[in-house]
Image: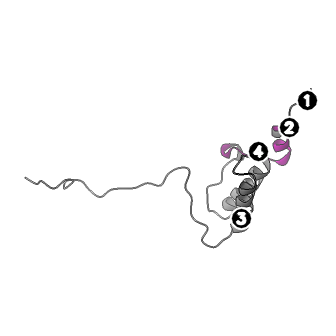
Amino acid sequence: MSSAAGAGLGPLRTTPPQRGSFPLDHFGDCTEQMKKYMKCLELVHNDNAPNCRLLAKEYLDCRMKHDLMDKTEWKNLGLPDDPQESKEQTEPHKD
């Protein structure tokens, strides 16, 4: 009788997460956009400012164009489709 723990188990299989993790930008394709976004966050003390969200959109768009993340709709990332939609979200509705 074997007393070694896990002796009957096969090799562990790992799977990548579906969201929240994506490849590193080894070639620096999107470094400039990332730096602008990080600087914005620093200036607004990590507050969820609309101008930083637009920079985040530029950064994520760059990552999608360079196949560093899966292409997805902006609404799935919590970002507007175009600048007009962003403006409507930040301004109060007038009747």
Q: Which residue occupies 67% across, 59% down? A: 64
N-terminal label among 2 and 4 = 4
**Range drawn in magenta:** 76-89
Report the residue marked by disc 4: 80
Rendered location of residue 12, percent (x, y):
32, 56
Disc 1: CA contacts within 10 A as few (<14), some (14-19) or many (>=20):
few
* Nearer to us: label 2 or label 4: 2
The residue that label 1 is drawn on is 94
Q: What amino acid type is highlighted by mark number 4?
A: Pro
**Mark 2 or 3 closer to N-term?**
3
CA–CA distance between discs 2 and 4? 14 Å
> Depth check: 85 or 40 in front?
40
Q: Are marks 1 and 2 in contact (CB under 8 Å)?
A: no
- Give the residue type that dot 1 points to: Lys
- On whether residue 49 falls in the magenta region, the answer is no
* Direction bottom: furthest residue: 27
Which callout, 3 or 1, points at the residue further toward the start of the chain? 3
Residue at image position (86%, 37%) is: 91
Q: CA distance from mark 3 to mark 4?
A: 21 Å
Q: Secondary structure at mark 4?
A: loop
Could you say which is closer to the camera, residue 67 or residue 53? 53
Q: Secondary structure at mark 2?
A: loop
* Left or right relative to 92: residue 46: left
Q: Residue at x 61, y 58 (%)?
A: 69
Q: Alpha-carbon distance for marks 1 and 2?
A: 9 Å
Image-based side of 83 in relation to 67, left or right: right
